[in-house]
Amino acid sequence: MNPPTNNLDNAATPWTERQIAGYHSHVYFNAGSLEQASQLCLAAAQRFDLKMGRIHEKPVGPHPDWSCQLAYRPSVFPHLLPWLAMNRNGLTIFTHPITGNDLIDHRDFAIWMGAVRPLDLSRLSGQERPVQYEF
Ligand code: ZN
């Protein structure tokens, strides 16, 4: 397997063969599960090499619920996902790869735990763009 490069050009690549620069896992919650979600995100950030975003107590971007973002490289995925599955304790978690097309990353490559929630896809661009590691 080739090592990942910093700039991935996926523009002409079939979707199934697109290179993945990283992932986001968005932990969803509401007022009643705010503390639980915060603790889960903090525990994940202590345990894994990832970047924890802000705790949003309102819907942001395409997300229909309050959320907190965990951003990480592909090497973290096989360790983090099982941990989230076994520790989410009822929380809904939305994970998507970052391949340089926000629309297909969120719409076609979505990985849901707990429930499928309706994303506001009108907020996402289908434009191809080069992606770089941001974390
Ligand atoms: Zn995201």
Image (tube, rainbow, N blue to C red):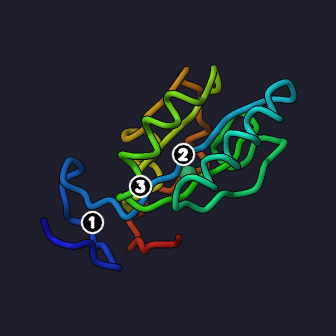
Q: Is mark 1 within 8 Å of ligand 1?
A: no
Tell me residue 31's x, y (percent).
87, 29
List x then y, in percent, for residue 76.
41, 55
Give SS at disc 1: loop
Depth check, mark 1 against mark 3: the one in front is 3
The amino acid type, in three-letter code, at marker 2 is Ser
Mark 2 or 3, nearer chain start: 2
Kind of residue at disc 1: Asn
Distance Cα–Cα, label 2 vs label 3? 11 Å
- Depth-wise, is mark 1 or mark 2 nearer the camera? 2
Image side of residue 92 versus residue 102, left or right: right
Neighbor class of circle 2 (other Cα within 10 Å; few <14, some 14-19, many 20+) is many
- The x, y position of residue 97, in whole percent, is 41, 51
Label disc, if present, on residue 115 of the rendered structure: none
Q: Amino acid at mark 3?
A: Val
How far is disc 1 from disc 3 in space, using C-alphas?
22 Å
- Up/down of 16 relative to 49, above or below: above
Residue at horizontal 66 percent and vertical 40 percent from the top: 63
Mark 1 or mark 2, earlier in chain: 1
Judging depth in this view, the residue of 129 and 19 nearest the camera is: 19
| Residue that numbered label 3 is attached to | 76
Assign a secondary structure to mark 3. helix
Return the residue nearer the eye: 17 or 46: 46
The 10 Å Cα crowd at callout 3, few under 14, some 14 to 19, many 20 or more, is some
Residue at figure coordinates x 67%, y 46% from the top left: 41
Q: Check disc 1 and report the residue beneath it.
A: 10
Q: Is residue 25 above or below residue 11?
A: above
Q: Quadrant of residue 12?
A: bottom left
| Residue in the foreground of this view, choosing between 6 and 35 | 35
Q: What residue is shown at x 71% (from left), y 42% (from top)?
A: 67
